[in-house]
Image (cartoon, rainbow, N blue to C red):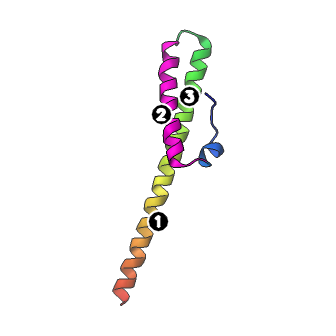
Amino acid sequence: MAILKAREIRQQSDAELRKKLNELKLELLRQRAQKSQAQAKLKIREIKRTIARIKTILHERKMQESKKQENKNKTNAQTKSKA
């Protein structure tokens, strides 16, 4: 499983990111089963970091969307109060 950088993650859609997130979680479980190997420990760290990056970017998108909606609602409320 390739480790994704933030710029690569941002280029993907939400659906793709959710799918990738599920794949990474499964990979993390597999790697934890092989925990005794030193290489597996490094792989676990990278997988956890990639999961965190994906979750962060999904959260950023969600916050941007809610902020847009909030601004739209404010604009509509101001328009109605002026009329």
Q: CA distance from mark 2 to mark 3?
A: 12 Å
Q: Which residues are magenta?
A: 12-34
Task: Please report whichever mark, 2 or 3, sits nearer to the chain's N-terminal start.
Answer: 2
Q: Secondary structure at mark 1?
A: helix
Q: Secondary structure at mark 2?
A: helix
**Taking 57 as reference, is 45 above or below it?**
above
Contact, CB < 8 Å: mark 1 with mark 2? no
Asked if residue 25 lies in the magenta stretch, the reply is: yes
Q: What residue would you read off at disc 3? A: 47
Tell me where residue 73 sits by quadrant: bottom left
Report the disc number at residue 25: none
Task: Please report whichever mark, 3 or 1, sits nearer to the chain's N-terminal start.
Answer: 3
Q: What residue would you read off at disc 1? A: 68
Horizontal side, residue 34 vs residue 82: left or right: right
Horizontal and vertical percent for residue 43?
59, 22
Horizontal and vertical percent for residue 62?
46, 53
